[in-house]
Image (spheres, grey):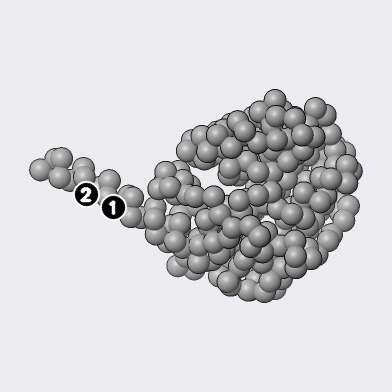
């Protein structure tokens, strides 16, 4: 009887995780290169977005179950590559060198792209299974300067909100949108703590749109600036990502992404 209950419990968890992945596929869109992604412009609805049924469908703390269920490259939020607009920015050579952080790094595509002899990169994950997937990817991936990514990149399992590292550069992509809106000000305060004065945060603002629920929760450039300006950041640049450079599709809302660059004062 005990064994039967255990089997039923394991089956239930597996099915729930599969539903979670299916939900993200519907909201974010499954994509494989050269699939192009979308993010729409969200109208502000106040300090917080109301959280609809989707938030209960995909609890923000259940990332480990989602990864353990078998998240494949190109599925849900995994774009199978570093975001093209961000890669173009890396290639300009204008981003800070030194220590960089990619919170919610997933398989580590951006971690590898940022890595170089002049930049050591930490990928932060809350899921041990995601860390294992990123370690596997980095074991064969090339860093931005063509060397082995594993020489410059490390993946750690930690809670972003209590993380104590200090960085010259942080890249946020599909991370802020995964956080419950009620914790967004904590996100900004933590960014202010971990980014050194003169350091930068690059935010790929996605998904955009006027919809309720998540994750992913809808974002806008206005939401990002209203969070970062009071936290001690000034805008460096705001770029609308060209259609051919979009990394993900977003069935809900308008097409589009914005690449926002901020400097810590």
Q: Nearer the viewer, residue 83 or 233?
A: 83
Image quadrant where residue 217 sits: bottom right
Image quadrant where residue 137 sits: top right
Q: Disc 2 designates what residue?
A: 8
Q: Disc 1 designates what residue?
A: 12
| Secondary element at image label 2 | helix
Q: Are marks 1 and 2 in contact (CB under 8 Å)?
A: yes
Residue 23 appears in the figure: yes
Residue 65 screen position, x and y as percent: 41, 46
Marks 1 and 2, how far apart at CA: 6 Å
Compared across the picture, whether 92 is left or right of 193 comes to right
Question: On screen, 180 above or below 161?
Answer: below
| Secondary element at image label 1 | helix
Residue 88 screen position, x and y as percent: 81, 51
Q: Give the mark count.
A: 2
Residue found at x 70% / y 35%: 142
Which residue is at the far left?
Answer: 1
Image quadrant where residue 96 sits: top right
């Amino acid at each position: 009887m005990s064994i039967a209950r255990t089997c039923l419990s394991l089956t239930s968890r597996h099915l729930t995780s599969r539903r979670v992945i299916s939900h993200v596929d519907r909201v974010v869109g499954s994509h494989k290169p050269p699939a192009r992604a979308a993010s729409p412009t969200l109208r502000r609805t106040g300090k917080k977005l109301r959280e609809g049924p989707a938030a209960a469908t995909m609890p923000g703390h259940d990332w480990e179950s989602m990864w353990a269920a078998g998240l494949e490259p190109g599925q849900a939020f995994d774009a199978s590559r570093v975001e093209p607009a961000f890669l173009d920015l890396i290639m300009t050579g204008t981003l800070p060198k030194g220590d960089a952080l990619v919170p919610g790094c997933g398989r580590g595509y951006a971690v590898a792209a940022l890595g170089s002899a002049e930049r050591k990169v930490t990928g932060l994950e809350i899921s041990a299974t995601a860390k294992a997937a990123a370690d596997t990817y980095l074991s064969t991936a090339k860093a931005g300067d063509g060397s082995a990514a594993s020489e410059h990149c490390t993946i750690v399992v930690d809670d972003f909100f209590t993380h104590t590292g200090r960085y010259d550069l942080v890249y946020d992509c599909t991370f802020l949108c995964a956080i419950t809106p009620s914790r967004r000000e904590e996100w900004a305060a933590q960014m202010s703590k971990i980014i050194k004065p003169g350091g930068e945060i690059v935010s790929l603002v996605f998904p955009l749109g006027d919809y309720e629920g998540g994750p992913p929760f809808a974002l806008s450039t206005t939401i990002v600036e209203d969070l970062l300006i009071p936290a001690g950041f000034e805008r460096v640049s705001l770029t609308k990502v060209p259609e051919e450079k979009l990394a993900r599709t977003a069935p809900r809302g308008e097409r589009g992404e914005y690449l926002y660059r901020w400097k810590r004062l």
